[in-house]
Image (spheres, rainbow, N blue to C red):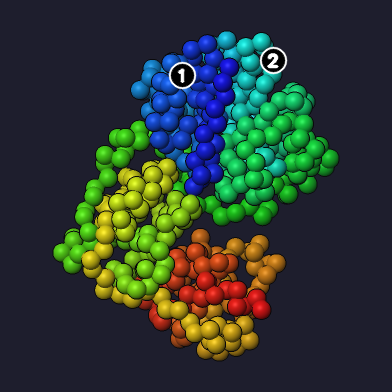
């Protein structure tokens, strides 16, 4: 028996393949189906099962594309309500993969239709639990993502109560030696305290996972309060991805063919941009500052581009991309497809020959040093998350609007002074500064890269 773990770094997402006796199952495959098909070919295995733990909010899965390409049967909870043919599993149902067995357990808490797949090896031994977003390494899935999405919708307190009982039940069923293979590692927005590990065991999680410990030591109401507090922001694309996954997403190759390449950004091509659409420039902040298309937003290419693209832009909001090179395009488009944002993408400009606006300005060092004590000359904006500000306020008189909410809360900022924006390191302030500049709140100073000066 072979268990193969795949890792999509930008979304910190794990998926899996189990191979036994010439047959293969995939669990929570990411958007690009190629790696799973290539593994099956390399091992001369036939993919017989394409499994979902739940309809994921943070990425679009290739489970349906793999089934269409290989004839594999789709498996998921009977509660999930997929719009494509699938076998709905009940608690205790089993899937044969060669001489190995996957047994399904209903584990609600993060999602009402969440399944954990328990793998028994070819000798019938309990080997590993594929826990999806129910159980992470050091954490559990957040409970507030299904209030308005999915076939079954539940409020966060109800979900948190389900999580409490799922933890208590499953930690009685599962053996301490059973491996834990989750759908995410540290960096995901599906939890708040994940460790930088890709696997664990039930025994270790019973001793070290804060939520598991709490579920076994406090009452239900105390657990619920602890789980729902302090969670990160919810990107705009999360409910959208739940529905895309429920309906059966198109394959990666098909989605890739739908992308319009518009050549370099020129005076002539800029004139063809739809008036109602946003322009997202993914070039580095220092390049964007030297010149960009007026009104463009700057989301620099990084591992977190997909998350911020899906946070700032609504899934129904049309947009264009501006990238600096073909290599950058390939990296960017992979993240765009990962969250299912190709449908609202009107086209991609590769290369820039036309810019009609300078970017946010850099503030002289002496002015940065004055910001902490003197709030008279600037409107200072802190775009960090509340938990960051609580431990390190930096500038007491700053307006505090987390970046995820900035576009909707621009009206709260005074317009009578230049705006100075900072975050924890420069990435979020670059994006925030471009939002302010696009809204014509200028001059705008991005001091995110100079934030270390505020700590002296």
95 shown above or below 181: above
Q: CA distance from mark 2 to mark 1?
A: 23 Å
Q: Position of residue 19 (x, y in %)?
A: 53, 18
354 shown above or below 337: below
The one nearer the camera, 57 or 96, is 96
Dividing the image into 4 quarters, which one contains the C terminus? bottom right
Q: Quadrant of residue 183?
A: top right
**Do tag 2 and tag 1 residues touch (Cβ < 8 Å)?**
no
Dividing the image into 4 quarters, which one contains the N terminus? top right
User: Callout 2: 10 Å neighbours few (<14), some, many (20+)?
Assistant: few
Please count the marks in the image: 2
Q: Quadrant of residue 434?
A: bottom left
**Image point (54%, 27%), residue name:** 4
Circle 1 residue = 43
Q: Is residue 402 visible?
A: yes
On the picture, is 206 further left or further right than 435? right
Considering every residue shown, the one lying at the far right of the view is: 217
Tell me the tag on residue 125.
2
- Where disc 2 sits, the SS reads loop
The one nearer the camera, 190 or 264, is 264
Q: Position of residue 252 (x, y in %)?
A: 35, 36
| Of labels 2 and 1, the one closer to you | 1
121 shown above or below 312: above
User: Callout 1: 10 Å neighbours few (<14), some, many (20+)?
Assistant: few
Q: Position of residue 309 (x, y in %)?
A: 42, 54
**Image point (69%, 67%), residue name:** 390
Q: Quadrant of residue 199?
A: top right
Q: Position of residue 98 (x, y in %)?
A: 53, 11
**Image point (23%, 62%), residue name:** 265
The one nearer the camera, 61 or 456, is 456
């Amino acid at each position: 028996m072979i268990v193969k773990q795949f890792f999509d770094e930008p979304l910190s997402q794990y998926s899996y393949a189990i191979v036994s006796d010439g047959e293969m199952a995939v669990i929570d495959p990411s958007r690009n189906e190629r790696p799973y098909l290539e593994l099956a070919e390399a091992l001369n295995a036939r993919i017989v099962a394409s499994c979902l733990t739940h309809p994921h909010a943070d990425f679009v899965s290739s489970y349906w594309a793999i089934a269409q390409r290989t004839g594999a049967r789709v498996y998921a909870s009977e509660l999930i309500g997929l719009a494509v043919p699938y076998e709905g599993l009940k608690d205790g149902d089993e899937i044969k993969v060669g001489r190995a067995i996957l047994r399904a357990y209903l584990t609600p808490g993060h999602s009402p239709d969440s399944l954990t797949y328990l793998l028994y090896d070819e000798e019938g031994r309990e080997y590993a639990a594929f826990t999806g977003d129910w159980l992470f390494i050091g954490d559990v899935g957040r409970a507030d993502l299904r209030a308005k999405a999915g076939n079954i919708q539940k409020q966060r307190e109800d979900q948190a109560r389900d999580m409490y009982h799922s933890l208590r039940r499953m930690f009685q069923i599962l053996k301490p030696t059973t491996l834990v293979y989750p759908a995410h590692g540290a960096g995901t927005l599906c939890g708040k305290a994940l460790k930088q590990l890709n696997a664990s065991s039930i025994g270790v999680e019973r001793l070290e996972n804060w939520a598991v410990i709490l579920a076994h030591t406090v009452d239900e109401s105390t657990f619920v309060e602890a789980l729902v507090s302090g969670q990160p922001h919810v990107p705009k694309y999360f409910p959208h991805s739940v529905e895309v996954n429920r309906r059966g997403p198109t394959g990666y190759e098909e989605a890739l063919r739908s992308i319009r390449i518009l050549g370099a950004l020129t005076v002539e091509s800029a004139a063809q941009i739809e008036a109602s659409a946003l322009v997202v420039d993914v070039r580095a902040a220092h390049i964007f500052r030297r010149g960009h298309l007026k009104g463009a937003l700057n989301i620099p290419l990084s591992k977190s581009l997909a998350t911020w693209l899906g946070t700032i832009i609504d899934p129904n909001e049309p947009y264009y991309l501006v990238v600096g090179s073909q290599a950058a395009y390939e990296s960017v488009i992979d993240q765009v497809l990962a969250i299912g944002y190709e449908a609202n993408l009107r086209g991609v400009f590769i290369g820039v020959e036309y810019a009609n606006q300078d970017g946010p300005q850099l503030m002289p060092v002496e002015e940065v040093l004055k910001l902490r004590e003197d709030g008279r000359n600037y409107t200072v904006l802190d775009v960090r998350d509340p938990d960051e500000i609580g431990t390190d306020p930096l500038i007491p008189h700053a307006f505090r609007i987390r970046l995820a909410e900035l576009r909707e809360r621009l009206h709260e900022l005074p317009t009578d002074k230049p705006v100075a924006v900072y975050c924890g390191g420069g990435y979020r302030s670059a994006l925030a500064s471009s939002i302010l500049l696009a809204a014509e709140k200028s001059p705008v100073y991005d001091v995110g890269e100079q934030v270390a000066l505020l700590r002296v």
